[in-house]
Image (tube, helix red, strand yellow):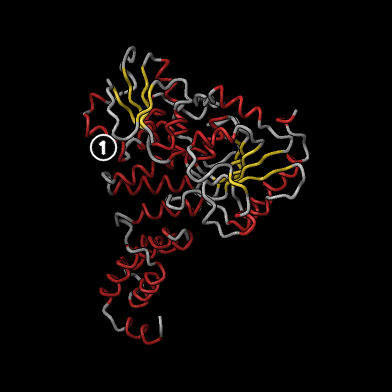
Amino acid sequence: MSTGTEVTVRSLPLRIILSTAEEALRKKNFPIAERLFDEALRKKSFSIRGLSGLGRLYNETNEPAKASCCLTRLMTYRPDIPFAPAQFAHACSMLGDFSGAARWYRRALSIAPDDRATAIALGITLLRLGKWEEGFALYDLREGAVSLEKSIGKEKIWDGTADLRGKNVLVVGEQGHGDHIQFLRYCALLKDKGARVTFFTRELLEKLCAWMPAIDEVALDNDKVSFDYTVMAMSLPRLFNTRPDNIPLRSAYLTAPPDAVARIASELSSKKKIALAWKGNPQNSRDAVRSCPPDLFARLIKTLPDVEFYALPFDLSSETHEQLSRLRPICEPDATFADVAEQLLSFDLIISVDTSLAHLAGALGVPTWLMIGHQPDWRWLAEGNESLWYDSVRLFRITDGWPDLIDRVGEELDHFLAKPSERSQ
């Protein structure tokens, strides 16, 4: 803002400044919102709306330390305020203090017990901590599960106990593509109970889902499907009493068709093939904490005669980093997940941030190094290098920042490249 504008803003009543700041925050105009909230706090240092707004702003811009500072001040003035503990819990989570986040989410629920969003956030936090019984129960409050029950009636939702022998069960895939892929495995458990299984998914995943032996039918939007019971895919871990020590089908559970296997065998190269993914879908709400800065990720690329690097992202047209944009994509931008899967089966190693393609590689049993940024997704837990969901996936967690993580992965990559390729032997 210019000096003249600042003088004009400072002359406005506090309520106008706050209303304008809140509107800017709603529109995600963060620089303007921050300046206005700061001005409001200069006028009134203990403004509830000012501290609350600034705390929410810093949470949204991934500055949890600043958010924590504002929200701590807010709760000092008003310890009973309903929304502050949940916002503070989110800041704790972003800072990696998941036990603290769980405590503050519980406090928020003690003030507002019907706040479903906070209950779900607590559930996700507990899942990160490995407390899956309570975590999955709270996670089932998510909108998809609630809407399904409202739309077809509770009696049509499989409750985990009803006899499935000879019954048609519709499993509804939900959320991201990676979630569809990860929870396909539970179709095998339903099949073991005698069910005929239909999996509802998206067009890009249709051919891939047919690779799962336990799936009898794949359904898409507008398909007519008859069923005796239905269930959300991400409710199945709770219904099968899944815990960190009993996850089913950790090894490869997607089987390529025979013609694809033959084609892959004929195309195997003596060179080591490594696929890279440094970013995910930019529309994902977690993209800011999971995608790696391109200039850092590019350090992993080695110029060696017996190594070929490829790009996992479907479309490199938006990539501005010169070295990364020159990588050969493993598939065309309009490829399906089955097309990508066929290519991945010929690779020696996948190095990826937390994207759907990492789930695909894990489900295929392809060696994968998964780079996890701040605030890991619940399925990777809060600590540890072992992936509980995929035997072929190794976790690399961020500690001091992306540069340190890239250095650690780079050192491991040097060791990997020094060994003979198992696929060429």
Q: Position of residue 318 (x, y in %)?
A: 51, 56
Which residue type carries mark 1? Ser
Location of residue 59 (image quadrant) = bottom left
In the picture shown, does residue 275 fall above or below 197?
below
Query: What residue is at 43 percent from the left and 37 percent from the top?
Result: 204
The one nearer the camera, 71 or 170, is: 170
305 lies left or right of 84: right
Location of residue 48 (image quadrant) = bottom left
305 lies left or right of 321: right
Query: What residue is at 42 percent from the left and 15 percent from the top?
Result: 192
Q: Position of residue 200 (x, y in %)?
A: 36, 31
310 lies left or right of 76: right
390 lies left or right of 104: right
The N terminus - image quarter: bottom left
The residue wearing badge 1 is: 147
In the picture shown, does residue 233 fall above or below 290?
above
Query: What residue is at 67 percent from the left and 35 percent from the top?
Result: 348
